[in-house]
Image: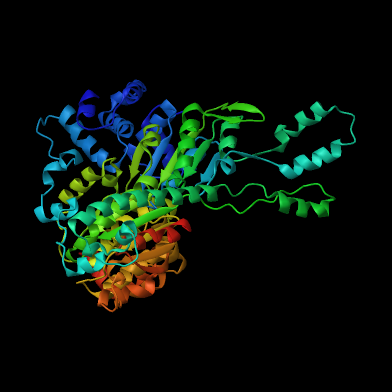
Amino acid sequence: MRFARFNGLNVGIQESKEAVLAADSGLLEDKTQFRYGLKSLFCCEPDEGELFDQLYEQFWGNERGQLSGTTTYQNQSNIQKKAPASLVMMGSGKTEPNEEGEEARNVSGANETERIRKTDFSKLNAIDSQMLEELALKLFQQMSKRIKRKMKNSTKQGRVDLRQTIRNSLSHGGDPIELHRRKQVPKKQRLIILLDVSGSMDKYSFFLLRFIWSLRAHFETVEAFIFSTSLIRITDYLDAKDLEWTLTVLSMKANNWSSGTQIGDCFRTFNEQYAKQVLAGRSTTIILSDGLDTGEPEDLATELNKIKRRTRKLIWLNPLKGMQGYEPIQRGMAAALPELDVFQSAHNLNSLLELERYLEEV
Amino acid sequence: MFNNIHALIDSFEQQKYIADEELGTILFLMLQLGKPVLLEGNPGVGKTEVANVLSKVLDTELIRLQCYEGLDVHSTIYEWNYQKQLLSIKIQEQSEKSDEEKEEHIFGSEFLLKRPLLKAITASEKPPVLLIDEIDRADEEFEAFLLELLSAFQISIPEMGTVQASHRPWVILTSNRTRELGDALKRRCLYHWVNFPSLEKEMEIIQKHLPNMEVSLVNRMVKLVQYLRTQKLDKAPGIAESLDWARGLLALGFADLDEAGIEKSLGCLLKSVDDIQRVKSTGIQQLLTEIEA
């Protein structure tokens, strides 16, 4: 048992006790049965089952080799560093002040905060982005607190509706024989976020990721994915208390950061591997992408339709939509449009904060 | 009960359920240790059926709780029968009893509507089999509530006090893995991942249920089903589907698998338009040559 514990299986005192009990109940007589018994006690997942089999072989069998398995706790060395991606992620790959930046600075009649809230992320200089970051974090936190509060309120429904009960009781001579209840609103909502981190999104992905992070801190059920040429689930990494740490780990993990985009392919991976798990029940899916796809638009439309059928609301936030004169005419975006419930911009703080409107209805 | 694991597997087989040694061991352990069993696996591999058969083998009642999103604790434990309570108050208005006596009466067990969990705990004769089906569909809150129930086997009803289980029910939980279950719950259970059966085992299962079917037909059929499982499909056919298909083929009077027969009965096996179209576009003839190879 100690051996199993040291090699990564979750074996506590309770399990040890039960293993002894199991052995005592006659399982020891047959080696295979004893093995199956221990397996059911020590393992909680199919992956752990495989690890157990290896460990068992190693402990009882004749082989005394090293573990050859691909156990998760050894993956760390697989993480490839990619300098430009990390830089973008850490917020140092900003644009220098330029003409457009100046233009943004001169929004007339607005105070500093207002101005920053309205400035396009791609037009920020280094000083501004520092301010924006602080402001963003504060506002995102306020926002998610508000949403959470509203969601809590809605769960209180389902109580007895006195007014209606008294009305109904008239036919029974004033005795409330039947209690009328308000309609029960299902409580738990899932939020699924797919963030495009391809090259064309560089200017935005950093802020959008912060946005996701702050949502995650206040919602219990947020599933997040990043995609460019492939799809990576990042939910577990958002869990950490420290945002900077999260960003660092993520930038190391995403070795395809800032590369091209194959939205259709990534969505297919999502549908095949994760959709069944994360889109169960009432869910809202948010896609953060500029829709500049190098794949086939038909693929994108088919896969998006699959997502649409499993989710309650499909929201696409596109940073380019904030640009004047933008029309969703690129092939990818045009193919996606018919499937969407909400198509919104996500180019500055204000536009992200607008999302609150859709999230509270969730 | 059972002296050894093989006795248990044999009695399962009498009920037409082919259990392998691993599953047999786990069920045997469950009966020895009194721990709940958590069965995970793809839809259609026969997880729910384990509970059905277990209740038959142990000759005891099966209490089933189907989980769904938004399932609340009340609808799974107990509810008060308000209408009956109020009518009872009405009737008692004329009686001579004191107010206290009347009140005591209102929360008597005759007004209690037992839901599956309370039913499982208060079963009087022998421990029932409690099947908590598709626990992954229920919310985390419900899962947390189950933790308490599964370790202490008691439920408290504020108006009546705590109800302690007279017999510990045999609990089987099933999950399709649409959501990751909490570690706490998993650690309270014996865990078993149910795989799709091997060719031989699946043939044996079908022959148990449909002894009249030609062995060669069963063999080709199961080969095809197993081949389809390796393909990329939205919904891989489970054992339930292959049984359905076998019954369908028998009902349609096919003695052998041919293109026309498969095309007509494909709906028994595949439950999605996309899948059916995918298979048809690959060509059924192609499929048949594939399984012969």
> Where in the figure is residue B66, as x and y percent of width and height?
51, 47
Of the 4 image quadrants, the one containing the C terminus of chain B is bottom left
Q: Is residue A232 visible?
A: yes
Residue extending furthest toward the front: A109
Query: Left of A21 or right of it: where is A168?
Result: right
Q: Position of residue B97 (x, y in %)?
A: 86, 28
Picture residue at 16% right of the left edge, 55% below the top: A88
Viewer-nearest residue: A182 or B280 = A182
Q: Quadrant of residue A106?
A: bottom left
Whether residue B157 sits left or right of residue B237 in the image: it is right
Residue at 27 percent of width and 54 percent of height: A132
Q: Position of residue B165 (x, y in %)?
A: 56, 27
Q: How is the image coloured?
A: rainbow
Residue A332 lies left or right of residue A279; in this view the side is left
Snapshot quadrant of residue A315: bottom left
> Quick one: B14 or A216, which is closer to the camera?
A216
Q: Nearer the viewer, residue B3 or A338?
A: A338
